[in-house]
Image (tube, grey):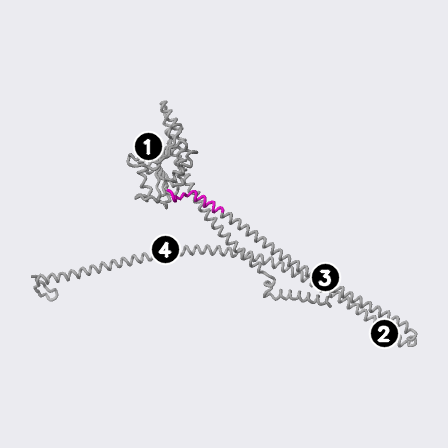
Amino acid sequence: MKELKCPKCGSSFVVDEADYASILSQVKNTEFQEEVNRRIEEIEKQHRAEQKADAMKAEQDFQMRLNEKERELGKKDTEIARLREQANSIAQNKQLEFNEVLSKRDSEIAQLREQTKSAVQSKELEFKDFLADRDAQIAKLKEQLQSIKEAKELEIANEVAKKEQEISTLKSTIAQNDNQRQLAVMEEKSKAQEALQAKDAKIAELENRMILEKKEATIRETGIKEQHALIIRQKQEEIDFYKDMKSRMSTKMIGESLEVHCSTEFNRVRSSMYPNAYFEKDNDAKDGTKGDFIFRDFADGMEYISIMFEMKNECDTTATKHKNEDFFKKLDDDRKKKNCEYAVLVSLLEPDSELYNEGIVDVSYRSPKMYVVRPQFFMPLISLLTQASRKSLDYQRELIIARQQSIDVTHFEDNLNDFKEKFGNNYRLASEKFQKAIDEIDNTIKHLQKVRESLVGSENNLRLANKKADELTIKKLTKNNPTMQAKFEEARVIKSQLGTSDDE
């Protein structure tokens, strides 16, 4: 039995063990539920904070990508504006040339019209003067006849025959003058017709010249298109050349293992470059491990270089393939067990590593005389090491002779060590320059691709400009231009009037 005291009223009461356990369980369950609810609320707050941080990060990433796209669009808009300005400049130049030709032709037409008008006016004045003179003569004769009739009526009868003769003479003169007038008018019409024909010939010449200039412009445009096509073809050939060069420099291990590839590459030049060399698979596993290939070369029966090779392909299903460093210790142990001077790891592992993608990497800071190379540098590394060792062979021979003769050979060892140090420096410089050459080739390919795209765009703009030039006519130029329309209509009227006069 348990005695409990009420905290409010202070009275005491007795409960049995079962009631006490029930009350205690209720209290514990309430406290536990409160603790659970508190923990759930804390977890939810933390979750909301993480969601907010993720959302802010996503928004920042989206804004960065949006800004990058806006910058790219700005560059494209600038290029489009430049091309538009170039096309507008070409069109303006063509328009100025055509306006100049048209203005010159209009001035020539106006000059011919003024000359024709002046000639007609001059002949009209001359004809009027002739008629005035004739009328004056007739009036004078009439006055003479009237005076003769009034003063000498008697003499009229006697002089009738004579006067009639004079009158007939005068009539013949008048008829002759009329014939001369008609001849003069016909002559002036002929001259006006010749002037009109000359004007038409001039207009035809100007039109032919304009057509010829248009044909020349078309020929020049065709030449420009052919030149652009030639440039594009040349740039494409350069692109293909650099792509081929890059593909040959970047070996892809497809359909064959790395070991087979390296063996094939060496056997390809074995007879010409390394006739005395030993290059075989390492099948000696008596010490528990073995490498992939051992290379040894000899001169005058003396071994001057030895290399232990290990090949690792990114497709190999090994447990430790992910990093090149995982193979350094084993490769160094194999080198020592097989008594080799150098150790080389030919690897396609870590394809995204900037360090190993340089081509040839000196890792002697981890293991002595150890290198990591990509497959395309397999043969160049053998060539470098053999050349260096051949040069050091003379030092070794002199060192042996000196030791046999009990001569101080300290300087020989110093020279040998100095040579090895300089060789390492020269090798690193050569590797860096080789990688720079590959980068330059990549940049050249990108640049040539941009040049090709620009040339193709300029060709399209030239095609559009040529289409607009072909559609250009005198009718379109004079549209909504009443001055030019009136000039052409006036020329047509004058031509039709002159043609009607000729028919009459």
The residue carrying mark 4 is: 61
Secondary-structure class at tag 2? helix
Mark 4, mark 2: which one is toward the viewer? 4
Amino acid type at image mark 4: Asp
The residues bearing labels 4 and 2 have C-alpha atoms spaced at a distance of 120 Å
The one of 264 and 300 positioned closer to us in this rendering: 264
Residue 243 painted magenta: yes
Asked whether, in this view, residue 192 is left or right of residue 449, the answer is right
Q: Which of the two labelled residues, at mark 4 and mark 2, occupies the earlier sequence position?
A: 4
Of the numbered discs in the image, which one, if any, rests on residue 143?
Answer: 2
Amino acid type at image mark 1: Asn
Secondary-structure class at tag 3? helix
The residues bearing labels 1 and 2 have C-alpha atoms spaced at a distance of 155 Å
Mark 4, mark 1: which one is toward the viewer? 1
Asked whether, in this view, residue 495 is left or right of residue 354, the answer is right
Q: Quadrant of the C terminus?
A: bottom right
Q: Position of residue 156 (x, y in %)?
A: 91, 75
Q: Position of residue 258 (x, y in %)?
A: 37, 41
The residue carrying mark 1 is: 339
Q: Residues within 10 Å of mark 3 (few under 14, many from 20)?
A: few
Amino acid type at image mark 2: Glu
CB under 8 Å between discs 4 and 1: no
Q: Which of the two labelled residues, at mark 2 and mark 3, occupies the earlier sequence position?
A: 2
Mark 1, mark 2: which one is toward the viewer? 1
Secondary-structure class at tag 4? helix
The residues bearing labels 4 and 3 have C-alpha atoms spaced at a distance of 84 Å
